[in-house]
Amino acid sequence: MLDLVESKLSQHEAFRADVLAGLSQRQKTLPSRWLYDQRGSELFEEITRLDEYYLTRTETAILRRHAEEMGALCGERVVLLEYGAGAAIKSEILLDALRAPRMYAPIDIAADFLSQTVERFRDRFPDLPTRPIIADFTADFDIPADVPARPRAAFFPGSTLGNLLPLDACALLRRMREHVGSSGKAIIGVDLRKDIETLIAAYDDKQGVTAEFNLNLLVRINRELDGDFALDAFAHEARWNERESAIEMHIVSLKPQAVSVTGRSFAFAEGETIHTETCRKFDVAGFAHSAQRSGWRVDKLWSDPAGLFAVFGLSAET
Ligand code: AVI
């Protein structure tokens, strides 16, 4: 309990520091992880069900269609390490296809979310030991000693890899390679480059759910950091950045204005933006190159008929 209170306090301090630093930059920028408070996580769930947001349903269909082959790649008695506590359906599809899995170990920094995941999986797979690991997977951490050392497989669906800077994405792939060891495997889902209209629509849907998700960050700042953002004076924008091969989410100031956060004032020009998230889109060769540089060999590539999304099956390169 004390741990939970401490972690909430340090989260609050980290949020405050990120917001004050981020709003002081020339290009105002906030780390995307702060989009996911309770309301943000609910809105993201809604996004995954939108017609325009093809990512979740496409990846889920790929997992369903090729689960057997993924199970074969991972082998028998594998320990499944999931980075980010479980998009339930996807982990369930993979666990159902694994051959006598030995343990499921979801890794997440959000302790309360992790304990919900653990309860759900203990109900759904009563014979499978579920071992939660509280850690920020974007930084170095060790897998606890009671998790069997091999065989292990890393699972990272959802194209969350695309939300990291390229160097951080490679560092995470390398960390996964260290965690699974020389006989290890990985199943990684990433979104692919495609026509810009489809991409923009996926991040700027007609119902405005993504807009609400993005602007919820201002609501959070107002609530938690004594901010006074006027919500009708800002708007959501999704833009394509060709050089970065990424959709960027921004919050645009609709007029010149000053905003106060924890007693500090920040000036906005009309049209000035806060960059809130980068969603990188991969091509097969580019992803394979990053994987190879991070100690992996690409063994399998599963995709959908329209080539929208890719799930890679990797083996540790020794
Ligand atoms: C969590 N992540 C993989 C989502 C994405 O598509 O990059 C986040 C998201 N942001 C707006 N819509 C979805």
Image: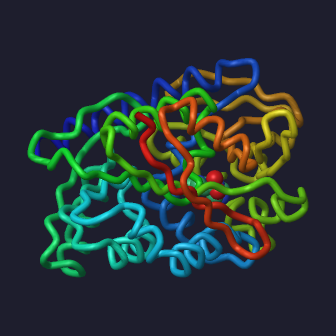
| Residue 129 drawn at (x, y percent) | 14, 65
- Decide which of 263, 197 is in the foreground and name it: 197
Q: Residue at x 61, y 60 (%)?
A: 301
> Which image quadrant shows ligand 1?
bottom right
| Residue 88 drawn at (x, y percent) | 39, 72
21 left or right, relative to 247: left
Q: Residue at x 9, y 46 (%)?
A: 146
Q: Residue at x 60, y 44 (%)?
A: 163
232 left or right, relative to 80: right
Q: Residue at x 89, y 59 (%)?
A: 195
| Residue 171 drawn at (x, y percent) | 49, 29
| Residue 238 drawn at (x, y percent) | 80, 51
307 left or right, relative to 143: right
- Decide which of 85, 190 is in the foreground and name it: 190
Q: Hey, which quadrant is residue 248 in on the image?
A: top right
Q: Hey, which quadrant is residue 155 in on the image?
A: bottom left
Q: Quadrant of the C terminus?
A: top left
Q: Is residue 186 above or below residue 27?
A: below
Q: Is residue 187 above or below residue 9?
A: below
Q: How many numbered marks, from 0 up?
A: 0
- Decide which of 152, 49 is in the foreground and name it: 152
Q: Hey, which quadrant is residue 250 in on the image?
A: top right
